[in-house]
Image (cartoon, grey):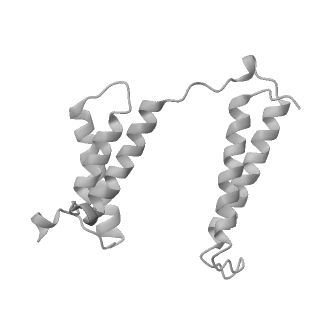
């Protein structure tokens, strides 16, 4: 067996791994049946489908010839760092970190933090356009999660909302 596309081969392996992990994790919940779905039904089916997709992609990577073998490029460390940092910052800003005294700053501040930190992963940074994007995301998130779905979590920092 000769790998003809490294990108597809390793992507397929990743899909199989993630799909398999979700499918195995879903079995700890009540799966139910097609007519009476339990909380584990959807993750189980999604995990199985993702694993099947991974098998297909991996098989294709060993059969279909590609130009120069579609080599896997170098890791984008800057982008990985800023995307992960933005997600950590979102979680900390949204709920706080009481163990070290960081208060919950709420949804709006967390979305602004997430957007500004994640935008540093790109090649260009334009503060005005990032501010506009963060504002649109904050308004959309408020409307979707707080107003429409009526989810209960802090929207504003506790020193503002009381």
In the image, residue 111 lies at what x, y percent?
29, 51
Locate residue 78: give its quadrant: top left
| Position of 114 relative to 34 (above/below) | above
38 or 120: nearer the eye?
Answer: 120
| Position of 106 relative to 1 (above/below) | below
Residue 141 in sight from this viewpoint: yes
Q: Would you say 144 lies left or right of 162 here? A: right
| Residue at the far front in the pictured view | 100
Q: For the N terminus, which image quadrant?
A: top right
Please give the name of the residue rendered at 19% of the width and 62% of the height, measured from the top-left corner. Answer: 156
| Position of 153 relative to 89 (above/below) | below
Please give the name of the residue rendered at 75% of the width and 40% of the height, measured from the top-left corner. Answer: 57
Q: For the C terminus, which image quadrant?
A: bottom left
In the image, residue 102 lies at what x, y percent?
22, 60
Please give the name of the residue rendered at 29% of the width and 68% of the height, measured from the top-left corner. Answer: 147
Please give the name of the residue rendered at 72% of the width and 60% of the height, measured from the top-left corner. Answer: 48
Locate residue 20: give its quadrant: bottom right
| Residue at the far top in the pictured view | 68
In the image, residue 159 lies at what x, y percent?
11, 65
Residue 142 in sight from this viewpoint: no
Tally the marks: 0
| Residue at the far right in the pictured view | 1
In the image, residue 67 lies at what x, y percent?
74, 18
């Amino acid at each position: 067996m000769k790998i003809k596309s490294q990108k597809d081969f390793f992507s397929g392996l990743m899909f199989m791994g993630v799909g398999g992990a979700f499918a195995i994790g879903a079995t700890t919940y009540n799966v139910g049946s097609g007519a009476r779905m339990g909380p584990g039904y959807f993750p189980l089916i999604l995990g199985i489908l993702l694993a099947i997709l991974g098998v297909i992609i991996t098989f294709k990577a060993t059969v279909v010839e590609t130009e120069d073998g579609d080599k896997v490029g170098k890791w984008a460390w800057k982008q990985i760092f800023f995307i992960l940092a933005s997600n950590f910052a979102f979680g900390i800003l949204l709920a706080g970190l009481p163990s070290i005294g960081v208060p919950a700053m709420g949804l709006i501040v967390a979305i602004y933090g997430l957007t500004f930190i994640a935008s540093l992963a790109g090649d260009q940074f334009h503060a005005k356009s990032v501010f506009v994007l963060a504002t649109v995301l904050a308004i959309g998130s408020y409307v979707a999660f707080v107003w429409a779905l009526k989810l209960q979590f802090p929207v504003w920092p506790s020193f503002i909302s009381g």
